[in-house]
Image (cartoon, grey):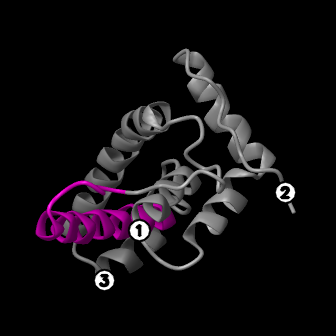
């Protein structure tokens, strides 16, 4: 173990390693708090592809454009953080799902539905929602 630490110290300064460790711990705690809050606040039909979703539909076009840019940037941050959490402590798949939900790209809703439709992921989400007295998610029937 000491040899591995020595190799890391040759390539990466100790201050950077300490910073990455602290950032990883903060990200882990933040994901434990933020992910359930987000999942509980979603409408039960949020991932149902039969229900149209319009974001900031009735707002001024400039405000809508600014909101879409901010939403997509935050989505990319969540996606990258979720990918990192696959290797670091945290809820990687759920964080990636939230990141994908925030971003706008073609066939996004179909990808979301496929991800949420996985029995393990749907079970975890619905158990979190159940703990807070929220109804389970509804999904469109499969093809």
Q: Name the residue located 56 percent from the left edge and 21 percent from the top edge.
A: 134
Determine the residue positioned at 37% across, 64% down: 75
Instruction: Give yes or no for residue 82 being in the magenta stretch.
Output: yes
Tell me which label, 2 or 3, sits earlier in the chain: 3
Main SS, magenta residues: helix
Instruction: Please name whichever residue, 91 or 114, is drawn nearer the observer in this view of the structure.
Output: 114
| Residue drawn at the location 22% of the way across and 75% of the way down | 13
Location of mark 1 (residue): 103
Q: Which residue is mark 2?
A: 142
**Residue 130 is drawn in which quadrant?**
top right
CB contact under 8 Å: marks 1 and 3: no
Q: x%, y% of residue 76? A: 37, 70
Q: Position of residue 123 (x, y in %)?
A: 73, 36
Horizontal arrangement in the rendering, residue 82 relative to residue 67 (left or right): right
Are there few (<14), some (14-19), or many (20+) residues within 10 Å of tag 2? few
Residue situated in front as seen by the camera: 99 or 111: 111
Q: What kind of element bears circle 3?
A: helix
Highlighted magenta segment, given as a residue range = 55-84
User: Is residue 90 positioned above or below 49 on the image?
Assistant: above
**Residue under the image location 28 percent in, 55 percent down:** 56
Where residue 91 appears, as percent x and y from the top left, is: 52, 48
């Amino acid at each position: 173990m000491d040899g591995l630490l020595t190799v890391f110290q040759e390539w990466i300064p100790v201050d950077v390693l300490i910073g990455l460790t602290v950032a990883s711990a903060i990200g882990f705690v933040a994901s434990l708090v933020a992910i359930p809050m987000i999942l509980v606040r979603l409408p039960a039909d949020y991932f149902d592809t039969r229900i149209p979703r319009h974001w900031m539909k009735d707002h001024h076009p400039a405000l809508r454009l600014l909101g879409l840019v901010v939403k997509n940037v935050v989505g990319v941050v969540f996606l990258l953080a979720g990918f990192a959490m696959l290797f670091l402590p945290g809820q990687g798949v759920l964080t990636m799902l939230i990141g994908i939900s925030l971003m706008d790209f073609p066939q996004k809703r179909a990808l979301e539905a496929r991800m949420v439709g996985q029995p393990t992921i749907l079970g975890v989400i619905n158990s979190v929602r159940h703990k807070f007295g929220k109804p389970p998610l509804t999904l469109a029937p499969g093809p």
